[in-house]
């Protein structure tokens, strides 16, 4: 090969590399930056019920390489509606407001799912506006029919990383943070049930707004055995879960004496537990604590920990860990089912996420506990 030919090959190689870099930077700018800061125009003035990115068959096909997940989520659910899944509403269009007072109606196209709660009648999903322009919401889904009922608009723009349902007091809690202070906010379920976007023309009325002592952020939550558990997400270091008690009315107990002159409520935890980094959700099942972990486009995991008086739930002590698609959020246990929510269906993420999960999945906990590697997955046709 002569020198001229070698020079031409080098030039061509450099050109190919430059073109690849340009396309790579363009894709990165569009998928990671533009979609995260910009909302596409809203084509419809209402929250869309059929916000699925995939059909049910398409969702199953997309997840078909995740044999463990397929086995837990879809095997033996053929007779259940939508194989037990619930489409996340509002991923394309969500009715909301532009202010805490609800002074201006708006439609958001960048709602990002975060929290999940299950009641006897409903599946509830919280979401926040990724561009920070619109009020956060809670989607209400009929648990039996799997149909979207309505959106409930929240005051302000909290991240709403967690939802928790107190069945005894029929109370719903959601995560909030104001001026760097972690808060838990409650809504009475009858108020949520009676809320109507058009008639109310303002965000839903809250019951209690209580600051939380001793925890940096209210990132996720769960209600278990009469207590509200609140967890904090940290990217790279261990974090904690705080346990708070409620009174006979279902309100967090204001531990600070009013004689101190405080003009807000604040609750002090009964105790703390240490958890691993990147926790996104928690749930309890029999004698185990379950934690979901995810960060960015890395694979998610759900870890089963044996409950312990030491309250130390870190990787080294995990009983069993399961790997799932990226961007898992809150998890909820009901009976022998584990409901799982992902945020990958949001507009800001579905441009680059490898596995878009646009439904709440319902996993079999007995299968997860008894699972061993298998070569075959049940027929889903």
Image (spheres, rainbow, N blue to C red):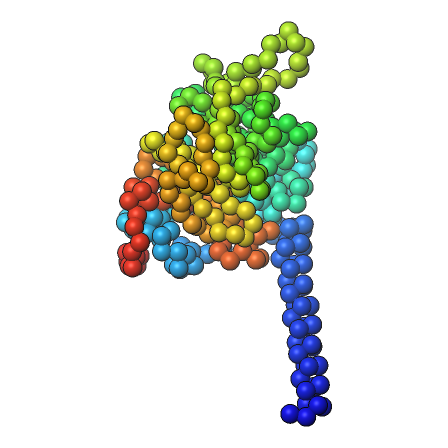
Q: What is the x, y in percent for residue 115?
A: 50, 37
Q: Residue drawn 62% across and 9% down?
A: 258
Count of numbered circles on the image: 0
Q: Residue drawn 60% across and 17% down?
A: 265
Q: Residue furthest front?
A: 316
Q: Residue drawn 66% across and 73% down?
A: 17
Q: Is residue 201 above or below residue 79?
A: above
Q: What is the x, y in percent for residue 240?
A: 52, 31
Among the 4 quarters of the image, the one containing residue 185: top right
Q: Quadrant of the C terminus?
A: bottom left
Whether residue 339 sits left or right of residue 158 in the image: it is left
Q: Quadrant of the N terminus?
A: bottom right
Return the residue nearer the eye: 273 or 48: 273
Residue 46 seen in render:
no
Return the residue nearer the eye: 92 or 116: 116
Q: Is residue 191 above or below residue 365?
A: above
Q: Residue drawn 44% across and 40% down?
A: 316
Residue 216 seen in render:
yes
Whether residue 69 sits left or right of residue 10 in the image: it is left
Q: Residue furthest bottom?
A: 2
Q: What is the x, y in percent for residue 274?
A: 50, 31
Q: What is the x, y in percent for residue 329?
A: 49, 42
């Amino acid at each position: 090969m002569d020198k001229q030919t070698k020079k031409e090959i080098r030039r061509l190689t450099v050109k190919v590399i430059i073109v690849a870099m340009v396309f790579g930077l363009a894709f990165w700018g569009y998928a990671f930056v533009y979609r995260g800061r910009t909302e596409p125009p809203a084509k419809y003035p209402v929250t869309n019920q059929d916000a699925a990115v995939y059909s049910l068959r398409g969702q199953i096909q997309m997840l078909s390489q995740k044999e463990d997940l397929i086995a837990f989520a879809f095997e033996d659910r053929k007779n259940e509606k939508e194989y037990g899944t619930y489409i996340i509403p509002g991923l394309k269009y969500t009715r909301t407001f532009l202010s805490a007072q609800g002074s201006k109606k708006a439609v958001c196209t960048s709602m990002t799912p975060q929290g999940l709660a299950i009641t006897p009648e409903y599946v509830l999903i919280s979401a926040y506006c990724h561009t920070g322009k619109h009020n956060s919401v809670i989607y209400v889904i009929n648990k039996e029919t799997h149909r979207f009922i309505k959106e409930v608009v929240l005051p302000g723009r909290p991240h709403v990383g967690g939802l928790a349902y107190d069945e005894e007091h029929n109370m719903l809690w959601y995560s909030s943070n104001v001026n760097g202070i972690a808060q838990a906010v409650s809504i009475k379920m009858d108020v949520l049930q009676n809320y109507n976007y058009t008639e109310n023309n303002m965000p839903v009325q809250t019951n209690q707004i209580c600051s939380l002592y001793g925890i940096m952020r209210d990132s996720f939550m769960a209600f278990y055995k009469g207590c509200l558990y609140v967890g904090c997400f940290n990217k790279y270091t261990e974090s904690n879960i705080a346990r708070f008690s409620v009174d006979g009315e279902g309100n967090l107990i204001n531990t600070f004496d009013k004689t101190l002159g405080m003009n807000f409520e604040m609750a002090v935890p009964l105790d703390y537990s240490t958890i691993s980094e990147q926790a996104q959700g928690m749930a309890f099942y029999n004698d185990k604590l379950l934690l979901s972990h995810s960060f960015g486009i890395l694979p998610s995991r759900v870890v089963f920990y044996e409950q312990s008086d030491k309250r130390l739930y870190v990787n080294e002590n995990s009983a069993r860990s399961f790997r799932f698609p990226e961007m898992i959020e809150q998890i909820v246990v009901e009976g022998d089912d584990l409901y799982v929510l992902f945020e990958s269906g949001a507009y800001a993420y579905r441009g680059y996420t490898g596995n878009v999960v646009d439904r709440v999945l319902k996993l079999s906990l007995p299968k997860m506990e008894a699972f061993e590697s298998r070569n075959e997955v049940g027929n889903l046709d």
